[in-house]
Every structure is written in C-alpha cells, then in structure tokens.
Amino acid sequence: MHQSMQGKNVALLSIDAVAGAGNTMLRPVKVHRKRSATEERLARVPLVRVLVVEDHEQFQQFICTTLETSPELQVIGRVSDGLDAVQRAEELQPDLIVLDIGLPTLSGIEAARGSESSLRGRK
C-alpha cells in the first residue's frame, strides 16, 4: 500500500495514540513537492491550439503524436479534407493550422484562403 500510494504524491504518516504503547496508526498524507523551474515556466505558458489537416491517416497520426510531445502545443482537431478544414477552423478557432496542400474536396491552398477570414485577428 505504501509503494502504490507514493506514485500519487502520498506518504504514510505514523501516529502513536499513546507514546510507547504500541498502538500505531498509519494515515495517508498528501505530499506537495516543489515544481522545477521548467515546470513553473510551462505552467505560465499559454497553450498553442493546433488543428491538423492531413488526408493520409498514418502521417496525420505521426504529426499529432509529434506535436503532442511538446507541452506548449495542444491538438484540438484533426480533419482529412479541405472543406472540413474550413468548417473546423471556423468552429474551433485554432491558433495554428498544420495544413497539407494536396487534399480532397478543396486543396490546402483553397482551404487556407477559406479559413483566413475566420481566423483574421487571431495571434
């Protein structure tokens, strides 16, 4: 019990009801550890919300997995054609769109033009 709880920032506190009487009770206590400088910096960094538009499923998965390794990036949507890209960009208002050029329905260039007006004014 002690080891499984340690992974959850919990330690066991030993309490004697009567000192030396042998009636010890173990009680779980939450342990707060100090954040590292990197953790503090990342806690203050706003997430960059990303929409991924790629029609090849395996490459789309690779892109999303790679982006999600960065704590500053959050993949908020994935689509596989240009028309869906324009609709999802208007709906989700991402900060960044990773956009393939060769897409079904609408090319990536046409989708970028269609998304541009809904994203105007975003940083």
Image (cartoon, rainbow, N blue to C red):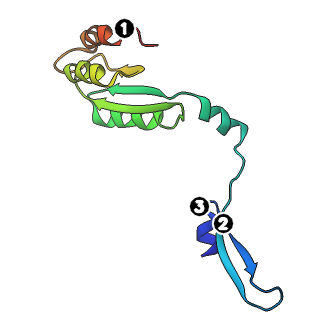
Left or right side of 75 for 54: left
Secondary structure at numbered mark 2: strand
Asked if the residue at tag 3 contacts the one at tag 2, i.e. Cβ–Cβ closer than 8 Å, the answer is: no
Residue 22 vertical position relative to residue 71 in the rendered view, above or below: below
Residue pointed to by mark 2: 29
> Residue 83: horizontal and vertical position, in percent?
19, 19
Left or right side of 81 for 121: right
Tell me where residue 3 sits by quadrant.
bottom right
- State the CA–CA distance, disc 2 to disc 1: 50 Å
Q: Residue furthest left?
A: 105
In terms of sequence position, does the residue under pointer 2 or pointer 3 come before the other? 3
Left or right side of 4 for 48: left
Badge 3 density bin: few <14, some 14–19, many ≥20, Cα 10 Å: few
Q: Which mark is residue 16?
A: none
Left or right side of 26 for 65: left
Q: From the image, state whether disc 2 or disc 1 is nearer to you.
A: 2
Q: Residue furthest right?
A: 20
Residue at image x 61%, y 62%? 7
Residue pointed to by mark 3: 8
Residue pointed to by mark 1: 120
